[in-house]
Amino acid sequence: MFVETEKLIFEKSKAGRKGYTLPEIDVPEKKLEDLIPEKLLRKSPLNLPELNEVEVVRHFIKLSIMNYHVDRNLYPLGSCTMKYNPKINETIAGWSEFLNLHPHLPDEVIQGVLRLMKELEGYLCEVAGVDAVTLQPAAGAHGELTGMMIIRKYHEDKGNPRKYVLIPDSAHGTNPASVTLCGYVSKTIKSNSEGRIDIEDLKRNLSEEVAAIMITNPNTLGLFEKEIDKIAELIHSVGALMYLDGANLNALLGYVKPGDIGFDVVHFNLHKTFSTPHGGGGPGSGPIGVKKFLEDYLPVPRIIQENGKYKLKWDFPKSIGKVHSFYGNFNVMIKAYIYIRMMGSEGLKKVSEMAVLNANYLRSKLQDIYKLPYKDFCMHEFVLSGKGLGSVRTLDIAKRLLDYGFYAPTIYFPLIVPEALMIEPTETETKETLDKFIEAMRNIYKEAKEKPEILKNAPHKTPVRRLNDAKANRELIVSWRDLKNISK
């Protein structure tokens, strides 16, 4: 069995080999010491690999083939919404007019940029049913932090910052982290037998010391909170606020506006819902939307339109201040803006329709062999359990999927499902691709019953075999220098 491998670029290096030619210097030569202070000059040569151009090109092409990415096949990471990124997004975001902008340029020469951001804010307001949006937060968890800072400032202005934030037991781990960073104490709300918020447990934890509840809806089991109106009524009855973690917004586009069902603060992931790549593919962007009574607390500067011109305004005395250098991850905003403009309202609605259809198709085809703890129709994702496969664990299933050419689903999350497999196909996958994934999952189930050692030793066909995760966490190798030191 042939497995593609590739040496590190430093290992391929040959002294004296070059991949460039430079013209002769046509200006008077000076000593470096005359141009650069001696204390800033290097005392030793750069440790850079030496290769010719074709070697460099082939090296990185091979790595791209060996690596797994969305352009290669299905990437069913539950809650991450790893959808296809249209290439026009990358092309336009890569225009020099965008890439070469300096963030200190005055407002009058970046009118188009400010207009793009202002219009994007408006589109997000429309999608979520909120009144104002900030684009500053750099990613999802940063958006959560910003949202909680706004909530805290609101309660402080009313004379009591309060003490607790309620979080369902199926929530993302970043939720309690954001709560703690803002000086609150998180209280866990249990799920009921349906996998949704237990209303009675919510009532037991309600008081006027509760600042907010953080809800992911649909939740991380892929289930819509059917009693969300009752939850909102209970939360608002004690003066607390409703916060939406927008990680799963891909299921709601065009059908449900969170602001219309009781949410006061809504978090977006441009790098999930609106197609821009994330993780190894690029930075994120986690805007926050709020209802009118919270607008004054948004970060500064804010983009306003005045006398037909766009400008950045800082004069908002109640603002929580700045949460990001400059104005946020602008390159990500460009891609999301293009995506929304190309899709239009009907296109975005179709996104959710197909995401929900694809998820339910997979669920219906796999629930007869893998355990499905919560058997209701799902939204854009669902959670199976690998429990009951003898000595085989969910991790083994995930590793074996790589041999079948698929990236693994999210595993061991949410924590309320033992041996969890959280699967989200997104709307961009065809039935043929989904059928191949189903076939792979069925084959793996059969192997787990008949030849479990195949799974325990998987993957077999990847350039790198199974890693020792504990060792990798203890001994971080993040550079060529680290690797050389360990080799010694």
Image: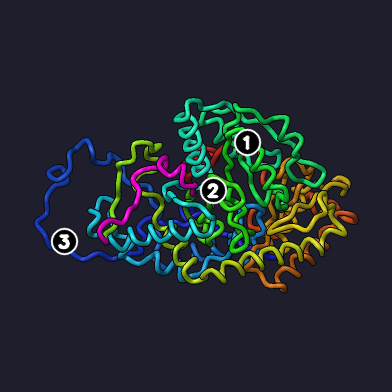
Callout count? 3
List the residue tagged with mark 1: 237
Q: Is residue 47 above or below residue 155?
A: below
> Residue 117: x percent and y percent?
38, 58
Say whether residue 446 is magenta. Answer: no
> Residue 399: x percent and y percent?
72, 53
> What's the residue type where badge 1 is placed?
Ser
Distance CA(mark 1)–CA(mark 3): 75 Å
Residue 266 bears which disc, if any?
2
Residue 396 bears which disc, if any?
none
* Span shown in magenta: 289-308
Say whether residue 300 is magenta. Answer: yes
> What's the residue type where badge 2 is placed?
Val
Distance CA(mark 2)–CA(mark 3): 57 Å
Please indicate whether residue 270 sits to the left or right of residue 41 in the image: right
Residue 120 shows in this picture? yes
Q: Is residue 256 above or below residue 325?
A: below
> Residue 115: x percent and y percent?
34, 61
Please indicate whether residue 202 sits to the left or right of residue 34 in the image: right
- Which of the marked residues, 2 or 1, is nearer the chain's N terminus? 1
User: What residue is shown at x 25% (from left), y 50% (from top)?
Assistant: 104
Residue 458 shows in this picture? no
Residue 25 bears which disc, if any?
3
Question: Disc 2 on helix, strand or loop?
Answer: strand
Front-most of residues 482 and 179: 179
